[in-house]
Amino acid sequence: MDYQNRVGSKFGGGGVAGASETNVDRRERLKKLALETIDLAKDPYILRNHLGSLECRLCLTLHTNEGSYLAHTQGKKHQTNLARRAARDAKDAQLTIPPSHQNTVARKMFLKIGRPGYRVTKVRDPAMRKEGMMVQVHLPQIREGVKPRRRFMSAWEQKREPPNRAYQYLIVAAEPYESIAFRIPSRELDNEDEDETGWNWSHWDPDTKQYSFQFMFRDPAY
């Protein structure tokens, strides 16, 4: 960059760089240094989304190319978050009690018999402006004494598909069946009403071997 014609500079001296030029030059130097020393394949926080952009899962920032991401990793925000993560991991390691060999619980082994039958129905309450889903799972060969279980999983927690922040997953498990997963919109769930007389409910019928439950999404306006 040519600074020799800036005000207050001597001929051939290059001039005095301003704050913006200094920051640009610093970022370029950090980017070049990072490109030479950092292997992106070993970075646990980098994620390439379906649009080809790069995301930093630690700082939740979006970058158009590798150079921009690498410059971000050398910045104050990323370094501060790295220090916080390291401190938290060290604290968790100190609080973790190593398992005793005497108290180790044996892992249950069972033969899976395939996926159960199911039906998913969309539900809607126009008065309350709520939308949701009702799921019915038929489990005729469920193990005696076992009750079905369900949980919601984020896109980053599952390992079967590339993470997509637009979706989350609903997992239903019951031995000896294989666990089944439903991909649903990544919307906030309405957990205000969880009794069986309201919109959010669950019921296991041991006679018909059918597990039914319903959940609602929170209205974005609230």
Image (cartoon, rainbow, N blue to C red):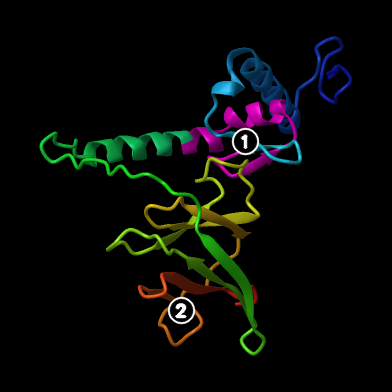
Other residues around mark 1 within 10 Å, as few (<14) / some (14–19) / many (≥20): some
Taking 67 as reference, is 156 above or below it?
below
> Mark on residue 192?
2
Taking 177 as reference, is 148 above or below it?
below
The earlier-in-sequence mark between 2 and 1 is 1
Taking 139 as reference, is 111 above or below it?
above
The residue stretch that appears in magenta? 56-81
Where does the image place residue 73, in percent across and percent down from the top left?
A: 58, 30
Residue at left offset 33%, top offset 45%: 110
Quadrant housing the N terminus: top right
**Which kind of residue does numbered mark 1 sit on?**
Leu
- The residue that mark 1 highlights is 47
Depth check: give the residue in front, 87 or 28. 87
Quadrant housing the C terminus: bottom right
Where does the image place residue 89, in percent across and percent down from the top left?
A: 35, 37
Q: Is residue 76 magenta?
A: yes
Instruction: Judge left or right: residue 202 versus residue 136.
Output: left
